[in-house]
Image: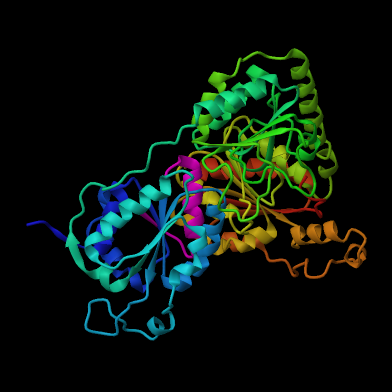
Amino acid sequence: MTEQVSAGEAILRSLKSNGVDYLFINPGSDFAPVIETYAKAGGEEIPEAVTAAHENVVVTMAHGYYLATGKMAAAAVHVNVGLANAAMGLLNAHADDVPIFMISGRNPLTEGQRMGSRHTPIQYGQEMFDQTSIVREAVKWDYELRYAENAADLVSRGSSVARMEPQGAVYLSLPREPLCELTDMPGTPTQVAPAAPYPNPDAIADLAAKLAAAKNPLIICSRGDAHGEVSAEIMAIAEENSIAVSEVFVTRNVLPTDWKNGVGGNIAAHIPDADVVLVVDAGVAWIESKASPAPDADVIHMGPDPLFTRIPVRGYKTTAAIPCNTVAGLKALRAALPGTPNAARQEEIEARHTSFRSRMTSKVEQGSQGLANKPWIAKCISDVLGDGTVFAERGGPLPLYNVKSANQWFGNTQAGGLGWGLPAALGYQLANRDKLTVCVVGDGSYMFANPIACHQVAAAQQLPLLTIVLNNGSWDAVRISTLDIYPDGEASKANHVPMVPFMPTPSYGDIAGASGCYAETITEAQELPAALERALKVIREEKRQVLLDVQVGMDDGEK
């Protein structure tokens, strides 16, 4: 006779057999069968559980883990209230096509007579007509468990859909009654993700011909893959054919900072003069109100979803669209191109690169005395980074840093959900315990990250993260946006832009210190290099997390 297990156990075993190694969880009363399974099973048969004290931390750690490994993790939260807190993390993942297997409990449906029926007042107050509506627009697939016997198959299907390109989160809600019911021990997965989609050969040949004949071709990119293959292919294509590359609105860096064909993210300086533009898997390639391609330019978009159909309004010029796995498309394109450098054009590209790098470093020295600025802070971090990784949320744009390879710098997604940087860095470091991981966040973003929950899970998992809080006591992004629209308005003349400052400023070091974090406050820019050395000593010798509260001046915008 086949061994019987609860649907909760079947789900956990199926997650593991479908390649999910971690379950990031903020549990509730609906997860009794899940908790019972961990009490009796454990080991290699089910995902390792990582508990965190806030739902956004749970989901965003899964996001960061994917950035480190390219592997999907699962995240689990408590019924509708937990799902509501998790929604922002899912919106961030959705904007960057990050696969997460999202699970939440679902209020018991029955009032008695069944195992798992309601037994507390909140199980009336938490009942909804459509709980999934909280996150439906942020996931690719959703379903509600109804019968224990198909629990494992639902996990297999959801895992396959999540990994199908373009990748993304899926959601399964779990009413407590079927979660408690018994079913057969699950076997091997019933579905797998489809093979990577390859590009149409004729479309690749046409694109290669256009690039080869172009006088001023341009490649636009904004994110790579976990294994660095997108970076390697773009760099090879550009060097072999003398093509400029503009890395814009970056979420996962593709290019080394000092690579000779990188001309920077000021797309308005490059796209109007380009006659052939290749947009490589970039959801936001330019801002229409500020720049656009020439009327007679060819503009080709390539990627798993080259039209980014999840975005309702995205009217970019598109003369051709090539749906494919990004790496597969780039490899096919490289093979089809002649690989003939153009010496004069290469010289001009390298001059643009030099000019771009000079602009990025021009403000470093003025931030090295008194209150630090972002260019100075980025330089100081770059000086000690080595092969480490930076997570930046309002921590200064990629070009201010000096990174040597792909996937050394991660920025928050275009969804803009604040509080992403700190938990994402923790999820990343969970997969890279011995790699220096630096989280550089604005003070507002730090508060949004639920820092008590973040520092607690860092202590519990022994993650020696270096967190640098840029402290100007204000929502600076709000100030910059206001002045961008009303440059000569009343707010521009005010000593304090309304609703922007938050005073008194909390003692961030005390918040972190409550979880055993080593903390310092830096009030003068010139103190930062020595403080970083002390921080690295703590990280290397004590394997302990560190927070540096760095006082900074007001920003002039992230250009």
Residue 52 place in picture, x, y as percent: 45, 61
Residue 289 in view of the camera: yes
Observer-nearest of 211 and 456: 211
Magenta-drawn stretch contains 551: no
Query: Quarter holding the C terminus?
Result: top right
The verdict on residue 50 being magenta is yes
Q: Which is more toward the observer, 409 or 520? A: 409
x and y, in percent, of residue 486 in the image: 87, 61
> Toward which corner of the image does residue 143 lie, by quadrant?
bottom left
Q: Describe residue 554's horizontal placement relative to residue 187 as left or right.
A: right
Q: Main secondary structure of the magenta part?
A: helix
Question: Which of the two residues, 472 or 8, is positioned nearer the viewer here?
Answer: 8
Could you tell me which residue is drawn at 37 percent across and 41 percent down?
Answer: 194
Residue 514 visible at all: no
**Quadrant location of residue 109?**
bottom left
Q: Going 68% across and 14% down the picture, which residue do you hit?
A: 341
Left or right, 161 with respect to 238, comes to left
**Residue 445 versus residue 144: which sits nearer the camera?**
144
Relative vertical location of residue 210 with respect to residue 53 in this rendering, above or below: above
Above or below — where is 543 with respect to 295? below
Residue 14, x across and y down, in percent: 28, 52
Question: As drawn, is 291 to the left or to the right of 533?
Answer: right
- Looking at the rendering, the stretch of residues picked out in magenta corresponds to 48-72
In the picture as drawn, the residue positioned furthest to the left comes out as: 1
Q: Position of residue 21 (x, y in %)?
A: 35, 48
